[in-house]
Amino acid sequence: MALQQQHATTADPTTDPSAHGEPGTELRLDPGVPVRCRGLRRRYGRGSGAFEAVRGVDLHARAGEMFALLGTNGAGKTSTLEVLEGLARPSAGQVQVLGLDPYTQRRKVRPSIGIMLQEAGFASGTTVRQAGQLWAGTMAAPMPVDEALELVGLAHRRRVEVQNLSGGERRRLDLAMAVLGRPRVLFLDEPTTGLDPESRSATWSLLTQLLESGTCVVLTTHYLEEAERLADRIAIMHEGRIVRTGTLDEVVADEPAAIEFEIAPGSAAAELPALPDLPGARVARRGGRVRIETDLLQDTLARVLTWADGVELPRLQARAASLEQVFLRIAGGGDPITLRDAA
Ligand SMILES: Nc1ncnc2c1ncn2[C@@H]1O[C@H](COP(=O)(O)OP(=O)(O)OP(=O)(O)O)[C@@H](O)[C@H]1O
């Protein structure tokens, strides 16, 4: 079912507004950039036991855009999201959602945002439909509960008590609750964790519809494929800071493409002469596995195939730089060749 057009996308996707402005100045109001923060910090505890989970984060998300916050466990994604959602006060920095402070002006912001937490609670004995109705009762202009359940594929489970839903069904109910108020901004904390591939794909379709209708979606996920497929822009957090951000192409820009194959002893490939000079490429060998990293994938692959001269190269793979590669480099603080070979 198509979602109604809720609001226009006013952002210019070709420019990076760095809508945060100059440090020390107030954040500008820009309707095309409903989510922004600058210098965001979040500290837990006090004194010598204090721990700073978010250490100066700048980000912005535009209307009609999916912004994916990625990172290792404990990187500070949920801590950041909770501040953007208005559930927690920042220790320092500026935060703006739809032009308002999501914490101090929560009552004004709340009707226009949808939130899906990692874990939500429902009163026991409540059916799926009742849970939706209770939630809809707190909203100014919710969509019909049955429509929201339909959107997440739970209409047939409307009479089931929430505690009897499977984990994946619970996750989909959480999503229905988050979209029930037709939010202009949707915050999703690991929305597809625990979903089977079909439900995950259905969730992706729903999110795509929401994006087309101009909703701004900010999500965290551990599924890099999800971010690669859906996100307009990505930020990778590590130890409380954003260490890479941009479009997928921008985030992977510094990573090389890779060609891999095997040369087993006694095979036809083992009879080949040494590899020729491969301009701009780096070759690593481990056992019989050859890995070539290159900035010129097509040119290097052509040279390798010419060199092989029709001899089969077992388990040949050639792939462009991936988000996983960037992620592993950041998470491991090292070289993906080493990480991959060690795995
Ligand atoms: N209430 C708290 N008190 C103290 N430390 C906390 C608290 N909540 C979170 N932390 C710490 O803050 C850091 C960031 O946690 P956060 O949940 O934001 O990470 P995350 O990136 O969402 O991780 P994950 O991918 O595992 O969900 C972690 O080291 C965590 O232990």
Image (spheres, grey):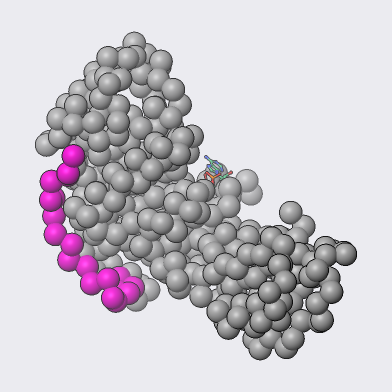
* Observer able to see residue 117: no
Q: Residue at x 23, y 31 (%)?
A: 150
Vertical relation: 336 (above or below) 44: below
Quarter of the picture containing the N terminus is top left
Q: Residue at x 84, y 74 (%)?
A: 271
Residue 285 relative to residue 114: left or right? right
**Above or below, 265 relative to 282:** above
Residue 180 position, x and y percent, is: 22, 35
Q: Specify start and end residues of the magenta stretch as a single range.
A: 1-19
Q: Nearer the viewer, residue 219 or 300?
A: 300
Q: Quadrant of the C terminus?
A: bottom right
Left of 72 or right of it: where is 313?
Answer: right
Q: Is residue 309 magenta?
A: no
Q: Using residue 93 as the reference point, say whether residue 62 is left or right of it.
A: left
Against 213, is 150 above or below? above
Residue 310: where, in percent of width, then height?
Answer: 68, 74
> Which residue shows up at 28% across the image and 67% down it?
27
User: Regarding ligand 1, which quadrant of the image does it lie in?
Assistant: top right
Q: Which residue does the image show at 80% across and 68% down from the upper left?
A: 268
Residue placed most toward the observer, 199 or 330: 199
In which quarter of the view is residue 94 placed? bottom left
